[in-house]
Image (cartoon, rainbow, N blue to C red):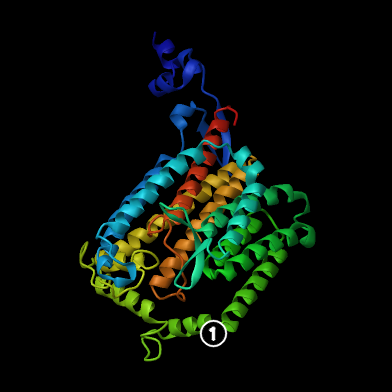
Amino acid sequence: MNSAASQRPPLWQRLFGGKAAQHGESVDRLPVRIGGMEFRRTAALPARVLGFDQALLWVVVLLLAFSVVMVYSASIAMQDNPRFGNVHATYFLLRHVFALGTGFVAALLAFQVAMNTWERVAPWLFVVSLVLLIAVLIPHVGSMVNGARRWLSLGVMNFQPSELAKFAVLVYAAGYMVRRLEVKERFFRAVLPMAAAVAFVGGLLLAEPDMGAFLVIAVIAMGILFLGGVNARMFFLIALILVLAFAAMVWLSPWRRERVFAYLDPFSEDHALGKGYQLSHALIAIGRGEIFGVGLGGSVEKLNWLPEAHTDFLFAVIGEEFGLVGVLTLILAFLWLTRRIMLIGRQAIALDRVFSGLVAEGVAVWLGFQAFVNMGVNLGALPTKGLTLPLMSYGGSAIVMNLIAIAVVLRVDYENKLLMRGGRV
């Protein structure tokens, strides 16, 4: 009796371990490489038990819920700004919620698409993004706002093709590296075609102009090249060329050059009411927040003092209303999010799913780098650049593409766990 009972599997295996556990057989375990030479044994549980990374999903949901609160708080005074016309207090809130709803539907559809399918359609998705980037430059097709032609009007919302281009370049670069693994030591055969594609996208973005999106896309492509195993000398050579190219763009453009000078001294008489206006008021907002903030809704800078408080400078409003505690909490949330996504990518590569792994790691680079730049700008650590805070700032197409990217990462994690239990993808 006692010996038979001792051989019975634990209760959780009998409940969730399937037929093998019910018959007293041991559940298969597969070694999974997490990083370096370390291994962790993972029980091959059914897919309904493994599912996908619920912690990642809940952190994203919490960030989105917080974004609804903060977009409403930051935009509540916009009805008094003649720039936006006669809008009601909840105008931006309702549009933000609509974008979230659209993004959730798009994310659910994206999650249904297998990673093998994403790999097949990646070149076509890249071509579609190029067509849209060209279309936005055509007069009477692309919408112009503040001197920049970046949007296509879809009636219910405006779509920014550069956001699609970030995702398209990501999956295209991942697929490209998988196809070129055998020649990754040869510079011209491995890197030059990809560099030409990114340069072409960059030329279209600079024509809008949207240097911020070009910077993010260049970093995504560089990140995937590095993670894909391109020779270190090649990587640093390309990085040097990119740094010199961006430096030349800034130096040859008077208004970009003035923005850098304003960043160096935003409170000077020459810059405080010019290129340094946004940065100076963002710093005032964060300074007012001190340790614990002035309280939700208590921001003064959002009352039409700080331009783009609900988009590019939402982080400054968070700093004013929630103080250092709120700022550090948000920074830690994005650090955790980036690390979690990167680990999912590394696990996929350990399972010999290189494309899926590079896509997930590329999403981590995308979200992490863009959040870093946005926070750095708001804190005065980087020159002003028109990049939103991922998953947080107001902006329909950005939110939709962020959610699609997260859904693809969850799909990678789901397929990882399916393979670890012996299934097929």
| Percent of width and height locating residue 162 | 54, 60
| Percent of width and height locating residue 165 | 57, 56
Image quarter in which the C terminus is found: top right
Q: Which residue corresponds to mark 1? A: 254
Q: Is residue 344 visible?
A: yes
Q: Nearer the viewer, residue 232 or 114?
A: 114
Element on which disc 1 rests: helix
Q: Say what amino acid the circle numbered 1 marks.
A: Pro
Q: Is residue 36 visible?
A: no
The residue shown at (54%, 28%) is: 421
Residue lying furthest top: 1
Can you say whether 326 is above or below 36 in the image? below
The residue shown at (56%, 47%) is: 345
Q: Nearer the viewer, residue 237 or 303?
A: 303
Question: Residue 89 is drawn in which quadrant?
Answer: bottom left
Image quarter in which the N terminus is found: top left
